[in-house]
Structure formats: C-alpha cells, structure tokens
Image (cartoon, rainbow, N blue to C red):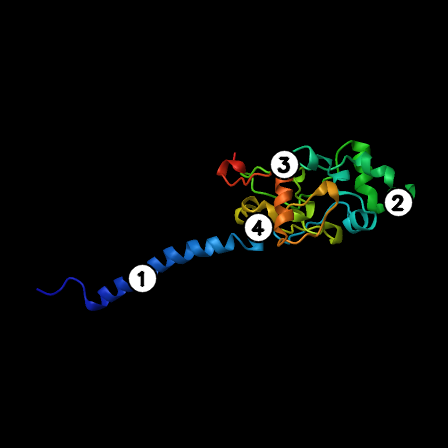
Amino acid sequence: MGSLFSPRANRSFREASVLAAAILLIVPLALWAFARTPAATGQYRAYAQPVPFAHTLHANGLRIDCRYCHAGATTAAMAGLPPTDVCVPCHLDGLLRSSLFTPVRTSLTTSRPVAWRRVTRLADFVFFNHAAHVQHGVECDTCHGPVELMSEVYQAAPLTMEWCLQCHRAPERYINLRDTGISGWKRTDVARSQATVRHYDVARLTSCTTCHR
C-alpha cells in the first residue's frame, strides 16, 4: 500500500509550519516595535491651533512662567488652560481687533473657551497628576521639552510606559530643586541628586496602580 501523502506534500507541510511559526513570532514583534515609534506614540506631532499662540514670544521672549497660564500644574492633576478673559488684558486693543484674534473675540462674545487642540496626550487608561510631579521637583520641560523654543508646540516625549519608568526608577536623575533656582546640574552629581530626592521625599513608585487606577 502506498503512502497517504507524497514527499512533496510533506515538504509543503513543513514549509507551511515554519512560515506559520515565523508569522506568529514576527507579527507580535513588529506590533511591539511599531507601538514605540513616533507614528504610534504621537511624538514630534504638532497640531494647528485656532490661534497661533507663540510660546517663543510668551515663554522665551517675555519670560512668562508656564504656571501663569497652566495654573493647575502645581495644585491639580490637570494643568489646565487659562480662560480667555485672562489672556486679553495683556494685549493692545489694535491687536485684539485683528483677524488673528477672531477666535478670541468669538470666545468672549459667546462665553465659550477657545477650542485649543491637545498636543501632549496620554492613553485613557493612564492617570497622571501634574501637581504630584511639579511639587516634587519635576521641571515642565522634562516631559514637554523646550516649549519656549517651539514655533509650533509638538509632543516632545514618547510617553510610553518604559519612558515614564525611567524617572520612577531613578528620580534623582530627573528632578531639580525648584525653590533654589538650581538648574543644569549633571546626572553624575550623585550627592546633589540624592539630596534633592530627600528634600522632596520622593518615592520610587513602580507598582502598576501608581498610574493604572
């Protein structure tokens, strides 16, 4: 009695098995790699805003502190945006009447906020508290990058879990003494960085429930 399958069928089955195994290995790895690319994380992505607000002028040229507009950063989970009537008094009437400020005038007339588009976005299943970070020595540019130099604000960091855990595992490498004005210290300055961690009583929080609640 002859064999049920020909040698060619056996060879085809082996090749198909190897291909299936390769797909089962390669596809998850490819998805894992893609999830860490800027195309998936939104890193470097900028959005056109209804009003071309110039951080280069306000934060760099005029040296306005980030917390003047984003007041919630020091007291709440959300940094927030200022109401329109807070921005208006800083500008001359001639500029307010220009076409550039049309969305601002509409906002004042209708009592509806300007429809700013969010640039830096975390996944919905991640909880982030601005106050917990800002009050413990994390500078704004640690996560947001050099906003004062951006002509159009973009998401500077990948905001992946791996990226966040770098700081949670070794906070002494990323925080600074805000109240003394010290800036630009080197990560190799172990004594100062450890003193900063003790000053703010920073804990190395790496449990899942720290961010996933």
Residue bearing the label numbered 3: 132
3D distance between C-alphas at marks 4 and 1: 33 Å
Quarter of the image where one finds residue 129: top right
Amino acid beneath label 2: Leu
Is tag 4's residue or tag 1's residue first in the polypeptide sequence?
Answer: 1
Q: Nearer the viewer, mark 2 or mark 3?
A: 3
Is tag 2's residue or tag 3's residue first in the polypeptide sequence?
Answer: 2
Report crowding for label 3: few under 14, some 14 to 19, many 20 or more residues within 10 A (C-alpha): some
Q: Furthest residue to the bottom?
A: 8
Q: Secondary structure at mark 4?
A: helix
Q: Secondary structure at mark 3?
A: helix
Residue bearing the label numbered 1: 18
Q: In this rendering, would 177 be left or right of 166?
A: right
Amino acid beneath label 3: Ala
Q: Furthest residue to the top?
A: 111
Residue bearing the label numbered 4: 41
Q: Secondary structure at mark 2?
A: helix
Report crowding for label 1: few under 14, some 14 to 19, many 20 or more residues within 10 A (C-alpha): few
Q: Nearer the viewer, mark 3 or mark 1?
A: 3
Q: Nearer the viewer, mark 2 or mark 4?
A: 4
Is tag 4's residue or tag 3's residue first in the polypeptide sequence?
Answer: 4
Instruction: Give me the disc on residue 95.
Output: 2
